[in-house]
Amino acid sequence: MNADASAAETGADARPEGAGTGRLVLLTTSHRVAPGLLSWPAWQILRGADRVLCADPDHPQLPYLREAGIEVETAAPAARELVDYCVPKARTAVVLTSADGESALTDGLARLAGSGRETMPDLELLPGSYDLPGARLLDLVQVMDQIRAACPWSSIRTHRDLAKYGIEEAYELVEAIEEGDREALREELGDVLLQVVFHARIAQDDPDEPFSLDDVAGGIVEKLIHRHPHVFGEEDAATPEDVKAHWLRTKAEEKQRESVTEGIPLAQPGLALAAKLASRVRTAGLDVAPPPGQGIGYELLALAMRAEAEGVDPEAALRAAARAYRDAVVAAEGGAAPGRSGGSGPDPS
């Protein structure tokens, strides 16, 4: 079958009625685009068709087509019937495909065309709507809704239940980044995204303070726009340093914090915590010496502060050194270095 979508989209076929062998168009639409939002070539072919058919009586496009004055037959004709309809009088028939496709029809058309004994109409596949960037996120939301409703494990999870998985997935994402594993990076980004969508879906069920993924996305969109006045507003930022200054100033205005230490999670790993505190102090222009004390903890604090001042992430540096030590241990054992580690226990991903 010659699925000539490009010719259909440009409206290239301008034959007068009664010329040629007719035209059979399979019109596809995306469930991720609002019904009724069809391309101009799609509306052209629908308005000019002699016959429009759809096997699904509940197809989301039908109310909008009928509102536009396009008569749609609820029918699932076989390939033979459509060929016999189109060819003798060079008529145009459009089949609005369902979400599952029209495999029986396309298989039948392929058999007729492949026989070499049939006069066939022009066969075209015309996309009536296209997915926008990010459209697959709608699939993720839909799948998460179904899982939350039907899965015995997922349907009873709480935010606290999932907290440990968020930490695990974040660490696995960091590991993929540090190892330069692109395939793992894509997978781990998906696992982190799942945590966001899962938590938002749980929040949607809260009887007192519900919110949805749209609320989460709306909040971060508003924050990003507000904190990038050099992109969405009239301020200028010629260098990364200018951007950081805008960001810090806007963030300070939003938070109205009494201390530079506010908002720093104390439960994060110790080296990261020490480096974050040192970063806040340095950015604020404060001169605060590390507290006096003896022991490994104070020595590590001093090392973390030194690393931050030199632009080194102490957590990443220690992980790199620890991996080198792991490899040395494995080599001493006479084995090969292990691959990436995975999480343990029940995992929603």
Image: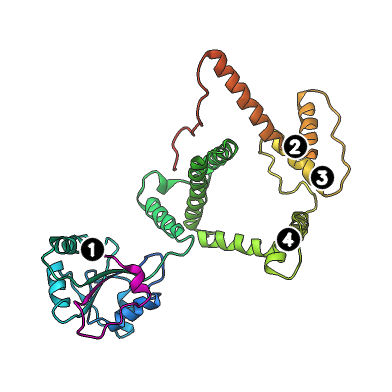
Q: Estimate the x, y position of residue 188 in percent, counting from the top left.
A: 51, 43
Q: Amino acid at mark 2?
A: Ala
Label 2 – label 1 distance at C-alpha: 65 Å
Q: Is residue 77 above or below residue 227?
A: below
Q: Nearer the viewer, mark 4 or mark 3?
A: 3
Contact check, label 1 and label 3, Cβ < 8 Å: no
Q: Nearer the viewer, mark 2 or mark 1?
A: 1
The residue that mark 4 highlights is 254
Q: Which one is in front, 104 or 36?
A: 104
Sequence-wise first label, 4 or 3: 4
Q: Estimate the x, y position of residue 115 in percent, counting from the top left.
A: 12, 61
Sequence-wise first label, 4 or 1: 1
Label 2 – label 3 distance at C-alpha: 11 Å
The quarter of the picture where residue 5 lies is bottom left
Q: Nearer the viewer, mark 4 or mark 1?
A: 1
Helix or strand or loop: what does disc 1 sit on? loop
The residue that mark 2 highlights is 274
For residue 28, say whether it is visible. Answer: no
Q: Which residue corresponds to the image point at 74% horizontal and 37% vertical from the top-left?
A: 312
The residue that mark 3 highlights is 281
Q: Estimate the x, y position of residue 134 in percent, counting from the top left.
A: 48, 60
